Amino acid sequence: MNSETRPRIITYLARPETRLLVAAMLGPRYDVLDAPLDLPLLETLHAMEPDLLIVEMELPEISGLEIVCRVRKDPVFGELPVVTLGHATDGGGHKVALVAGCTGYISFPLDPVLFPRRIQDFLEGKKDELDLKEHLQYYRRFTEVLIEKLEQRLERLEKKTRALEAERERQDALTLQVLTSMAKLIETKDTYTRGHSVRVTRYALALAREVGLAGEDLKVLERAGQLHDIGKVSIDLKQIHKPGPLTPEEWALIRQHPETGHTILAAIAFLKDEALVVRHHHQRFEGYEKHPEIPRRIRLMASILTLADSYDAMTSQRSYNSPRSTDDALKELDRCSGTQFDPQLVKAFKRIAKTLEQDANDPPG
Ligand SMILES: [Fe+2]
Ligand SMILES: [Fe+2]
């Protein structure tokens, strides 16, 4: 018992009105303190050093039975009087609570005369007891109730996890939307790149499917395609597409855009793979030999993007040259196969190029 004359009672109760009632009935004789429900009770108990604990059987997040079990498992509180409050109509719940290790059980409604008296009894060492037969009888019920309560808690946790997951997905979708809009905005500032990312993504996905990519890889590639030139945010495209040759500074700025894109995307947790694909989307096929650290999966996706990107650059109008025909662009891919482009991908792209061209020319229907 505390050195002060007034014993300290900690309550762990679900409803504010019960807390008020208990405080009103016990306050004249004891120090009554409420343990916050949103903090681990054992930590509170260690900090407050109570002489008695009152726990309600029905709590919002955890059952009173579990609380009693946890308190009893802590050697410091092996002998702490623990009193549970519950309803007399709970089908033997009070006996189950005694099996769990509580010192006594008091039923609602709380009697203003009897309640303080019983608390005093428990403080003085009195215990509600079960005989052996009852103990054995309710032990099975105790296990069942505990499992049932644990299952309910698990279900609530699962529901919460699902809600959090849905919220995270919503946030990710929003982030992606903002980034895609930003990438589109960069493109629309310049006539020659308008629609570039949409076409590159379409070519890249078709090629990826042709070489057997599926599932999450396609999703990564789709996002990387939409965002591959986002690093051009630091470049004035109109300036770049002026007539005449580029200055060395302008070239340096252009060469920097995959790295800038990587920096932007790598800061976003769910776009880590996309950031790597974007970083390497101008990597030459023969250059990968010098970069064994790039994972094969990233390398394949980046190589697909490189090919799709170059194909679109060749077949769409650019300031410095007129668009090439499909045949002409495929010849160029062939010429650079094994040096700039992955030969397997060039072969695969040649198989699907005609269909892609047809799809692009078909009126929307
Ligand atoms: Fe690029
Ligand atoms: Fe591009």
Image (cartoon, rainbow, N blue to C red):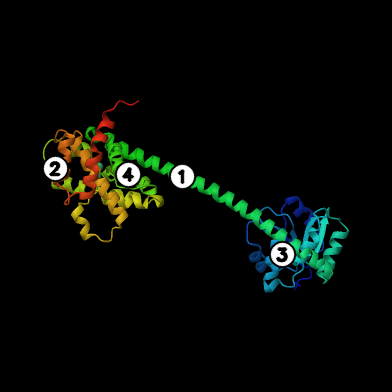
Tag 1 and tag 3, C-beta contact below 8 Å: no
Residue matched to label 2: 246
Gap between marks 4 and 2 measured at Cα = 37 Å
Question: Quarter of the picture for ligand 2?
Answer: top left
Establish if 73 lies above or below 267: below
Residue matched to label 1: 171
Asked if residue 68 can be seen in this view, the reply is yes
For label 3, the SS is: helix
* Foreground label between 2 and 3: 3
Gap between marks 2 and 1 measured at Cα = 40 Å
Gap between marks 2 and 3 measured at Cα = 77 Å
* Foreground label between 4 and 1: 4
* Foreground label between 2 and 1: 1
**Which mark identifies residue 209?**
4
Q: Is residue 95 left or right of residue 72?
A: right
- At x 30%, y 25%, the residue is 363
Tag 4 and tag 1, C-beta contact below 8 Å: no
- At x 17%, y 51%, the residue is 338
> Badge 1: how crowded within 10 Å, few (<14), some, or many (20+)?
few
Closest to the observer, 184 or 153: 153
Ranked by sequence position, the earlier of labels 2 and 3 is 3
Establish if 365 lies above or below 14: above
- At x 69%, y 56%, the residue is 148
Ranked by sequence position, the earlier of labels 4 and 1 is 1
